[in-house]
Image (tube, grey):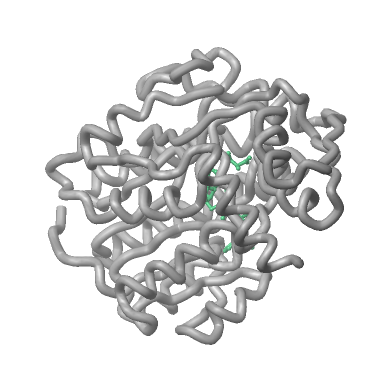
Amino acid sequence: MSDRPMKRILVTGSAGQIGSELVMVLREKYGNDNVVAGINRTQPSERIKNSGPVEVCDIRKREQLDDVVDRYDIDTIYNMAAILSAVGEQKPLLAWDVNMNGFQNVLECAREKELVRVMNPSSIAAFGPETPRINTPQETVLKPRTMYGVTKVAGELLGDYYFRKFGVDVRGVRYPGIISSETPPGGGTTDYAVAIFYEAIKHGRYECFVREDTVLPMMYMPDALKGLMDLAEAPVEKLEHHCDFNLASMSFSAGELAAEIKKHIPELEVTYKPDFRQAIADSWPQSIDDSAARREWGWEPSFDLSSMTKDMIEKLSAKLL
Ligand code: NAD
Ligand code: AKB
């Protein structure tokens, strides 16, 4: 296991909800030229294009990955390329291909080239209906019902295997639903918790695709970025877990979120028309025990429902109005 510093980073999936913001905070910390934004088909933001290197890098194509890693002397990969839960249920084979075969390419590249670190997010989708839903423990039943969840559990296990068998320093957190204002989410079940802000500001109404009483764990983007970057910097000898850290911040129902937004936009009208994503939401936890992350690397979120809502409305109003 290496204590070498992370100096040159590739972020795969840089046009996505998290990757698009992660690239910018990593560039601030490590220098613009030292953070390569890897994209697939979707173009990255102007901010990303104008501030540093961008390369096409489909993680299913090992030669593309190797080429970027070699040319830029990459030592760390943040693998943010993925197919999320809702799209994954429409295209399960694609979800397997990207989330498993693609991730294994990342791991093999890291093993062969002796990279310093691989960061690979997991998700609350790793849990399933047999998992305790309240204060879900770190060690618990992992029997998801979605293809996305299957790939997340397998990805956690594969990452831990590469750590123990080959000494590749792979780390990851089980993110809850991420709420953010920069890039809309890419086809998950928790997307309603972002879409409601856009629709509230633009149209004053929103038709929500889960029931009003649906409670899920969520997190605001600044906490999500800080969490992953803090884990990446944590001393390896302090870590008992590696690829599967539970991570919590806030939990609320769709109705509670609507009520909080109405404090700022009183005219907002929300209706509820559950679709296939309701069953996915019902199979996931409502709240998460993240004591392992707090103990092993000092995780502590900053935002709650009220401060997140205020900040989202300020940022999105400036962008949309
Ligand atoms: P996203 O869907 O917004 O972005 C994923 C990006 O990956 C997209 O830009 C897509 O074009 C790209 N991509 C797809 N196939 C690719 C391929 N073969 N090669 C390279 N790029 C490819 O996803 P996100 O929300 O930014 O998620 C990033 C990571 O965080 C994923 O591992 C996801 O499972 C995890 N996560 C996200 C959330 C959330 O709420 N956003 C919650 C839990 C976990
Ligand atoms: C999804 O809903 O698929 C993601 C996740 C919680 O992993 N946002």
Q: Closest to the observer: 164 or 251?
A: 251
Question: Is residue 27 depicted above or below 60 in this figure?
Answer: below
Asked if residue 212 lies left or right of residue 61, the reply is right
Q: Closest to the observer: 260 or 142?
A: 260
Residue at the image position 48 percent from the left and 23 percent from the top? 142
For residue 91, which quarter of the picture?
A: top right
Residue at the image position 45 percent from the left and 25 percent from the top? 288
Q: Is residue 162 visible?
A: yes
For ligand 1, give the image quadrant: bottom right
Question: Is residue 220 depicted above or below 284 in this figure?
Answer: below
Q: Is residue 98 visible?
A: no
For residue 253, which quarter of the picture?
A: top right
Residue at the image position 45 percent from the left and 20 percent from the top? 136
Q: Closest to the observer: 72 or 166?
A: 72
Name the quadrant of the C terminus: bottom right
Numbered-mark total: 0
Asked if residue 7 lies left or right of residue 18, the reply is left
Q: Closest to the observer: 90 or 197?
A: 197
Q: Position of residue 218 (x, y in %)?
A: 54, 37
Q: Position of residue 121 (x, y in %)?
A: 45, 47
Q: Position of residue 284 (x, y in %)?
A: 59, 25
Question: Is residue 103 depicted above or below 71 in this figure?
Answer: above
Residue at the image position 17 percent from the left and 47 percent from the top? 236
Q: Position of residue 32 (x, y in %)?
A: 38, 81
